[in-house]
Structure formats: C-alpha cells, structure tokens
Amino acid sequence: MNTSTIEVHLGGRIRKPANQVLLLRSDVNYTHIHMKNGEHYVVATTLKALEERLEKHGFWRLNKSEMVNLSAAKILKNEGLVKVRNHEPMKISRRKRQKMNTILFSEVSST
C-alpha cells in the first residue's frame, strides 16, 4: 500500500490523503491547512500534534509555525527558504536548516 495515499486525521471530522496536504500554518492552538486543490481548513489541533501524524508521510517542520509536504516544496537551499506553489517563500529556522542539509546530503550521496 502506498503511504502517500493513506488518509490522515487532520482534526475535527476532517480526514484527507496525506499527499493532498500542501502546507500547514499554526495560529496559537489552531492550524490552517492548505490543500493542493486550493481548499483551506482551520482545525483546533496544534501543529505539534499534526507533525506527529504527518512526519512519516514526508512532511517537514520548517520553523515554529510552518510545516510543508516536501514532495510539493522547492527548497531554496542557499537562501534558507522553502517555496510552495501559490504561497510566499517560508524561512527555515537555523536549527532545522542544519538538519535539512544533513538529510539532503545523505539523500544525494545515497543515489
């Protein structure tokens, strides 16, 4: 079974395929969920809880308030930014940038 098509619980009664989620942004105890098809949801679930549900599906926490689907993101490595379709570039926190460089380097050397 392909893990990217597995539905994940996003909050409330919302269950969507993980591969259709584009971007998540926190707003105190709420999270704004942006989908690939342009839909937008606001759920009363913290980004930390959603991170635990989604990280095994290819999602990456960029900073304190944003998480993206890496398959839909373009990493601007030299600028420390991530660009997702129809959204402003998002800054990768300093600590996350170091870990992302390690991950990217290991993927490049393993191929």
Image (tube, rainbow, N blue to C red):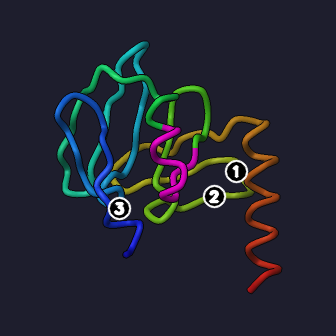
What is the three-letter code of the residue carrying label 2?
Leu
Q: Where in the figure is residue 57, as x and y percent of width and height?
A: 48, 58
Q: Where in the figure is residue 32, as x and y percent of width and height?
A: 32, 30
The label shown at residue 103 is none
Residue toward you, 9 or 20: 9
* Residue that badge 2 annotates: 76
Q: Secondary structure at mark 3?
A: helix
25 lies left or right of 110: left
* Residue that badge 1 annotates: 79
Q: From this viewpoint, which residue is outermost toward the front?
A: 1
Could you tell me which residue is drawn at 63 percent across and 58 percent down?
Answer: 76
Residue toward you, 67 or 6: 6
Query: How far is the residue under mark 3 from the one under mark 1?
Result: 26 Å
What is the three-letter code of the residue carrying label 3?
Asn
Q: Are the two marked residues, 2 and 3, in contact with CB atoms closer than 8 angstroms?
A: no
Per the rendered image, the range of residues in magenta is 51-60
* Residue that badge 3 annotates: 19
Q: Quadrant of residue 104?
A: bottom right
Query: How many residues crowd mark 1 within 10 Å: few (<14), some (14–19), many (20+)?
Result: few
90 lies left or right of 79: left
First of labels 3, 1 by sequence position? 3
